[in-house]
Amino acid sequence: MNNLSYNIKLGLCFAGIFGCYFYYGVVQEKITRGTYGEKEERYYYTMFLVFCQCIINSLFAKGVLVLTKAPVDKTPRKLVFICGVTYVGAMLASNASLKWVNYPTQVLGKSCKPIPVMLLGVFLAGKRYNVVKYLSVVLITIGIALFMFKDGKSGDSGFSFGFGEILLLTSLTLDGLTGVSQEKMRSHGTRAHFMMMGMNLSALVVMSIGLVATGELWLAIDFCSRHPAIVPEIITFGIASAMGQNFIFITVSEFGPLMCSIMTTTRKFFTILGSVVFFGNTLLARQWLGTFIVFTGLILDNMYGKTIKKV
């Protein structure tokens, strides 16, 4: 792949991820913050929502595989299952951490995602990157952390490390292990949509156990039966997720999980930056510094960070 086609394909993947997940966020906000029925009930069953999302993701991927008449994939099923378990585990641990830490802390923690993906890729998947790649990832992470950080109130007691932070570290570690599994799947020549289908089917197994064990499955079904207006919204939410994952797994397959983690991490950064450009929202000096650092890291990575060697 020459430099021009590399940049065009990468740009299309980023645009697809950005556009699909922007709409995904709008629909998610409508479902989780909206009210239903005369009693104005709220929907709280996030695990069931993710479960439905995984079903639609799996069906979408299967449809693409059938339409493209993809050959039988020979990736070890154990590897696919492990990848799906770490993927859903990272998501559940991150969501659960919000019970003990505030949202800005979670965003800051997850902004570090490219680092464990890169480091565990080196130690467990045998990846090797040039020095500029390491530097650009660190710069992007620091820039996003500066940009997303929200100053605490004067009464805040400073840094503390508790169960919420442990869950965030667990989530980041599982993100890194997901990246390792995806690298190993790439070495088997796994196609993007087989990877997508396999990971979501594996996640469904874990989610099914969780839904039954917690009783959330029956509560969510009861809510949907009482408020059928939410059903098309959940379907729309799933379709937006499937389209976004389509671009995510193409990115993983073509450019690797590290590049994908950089793109998904910078997505929120560009969303907020877009609000500044189009709606005149203001940024603090610290956020402008973070913006400069992020773009420095992205430019360095684009110009000099593509050389990757594997042991």
Image (cartoon, grey):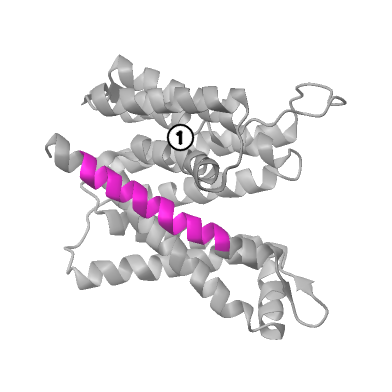
Left/right placement of residue 205 relative to residue 34 reads left
Q: 12 or 52: nearer the eye?
A: 12
**Which picture quadrant has residue 157?**
top right
Quarter occupied by the N terminus:
top left
Across and down, in percent, residue 84 comes to: 44, 52
Q: Which residue is drawn at 54% across and 26% down?
A: 288
Residue position marked by numbered label 1 in the rendering: 176
Q: Which residue is drawn at 57% across and 39% down?
A: 171
Question: Within 10 angstroms of label 1, few (less than 14), some, or many (20 or more) residues?
Answer: many
Q: Is residue 147 in view from this perspective? A: yes
Residue that protrudes farthest toward the right in the picture: 155
**Which picture quadrant has residue 256?**
top left
Q: How many marks?
A: 1
Q: Does the magenta stretch include residue 1?
A: no
Examine the rendered structure and indicate whether residue 64 appears above or below residue 122.
below
- Tell me the SS state at disc 1: helix
What residue span does the magenta drawing correspond to? 7-26
| SS majority, magenta | helix
Q: 287 or 199: nearer the eye?
A: 287
Residue that protrudes farthest toward the left in the picture: 2
Q: Is residue 211 in view from this perspective? A: no
Task: Say which amino acid is labelled 1.
Answer: Gly
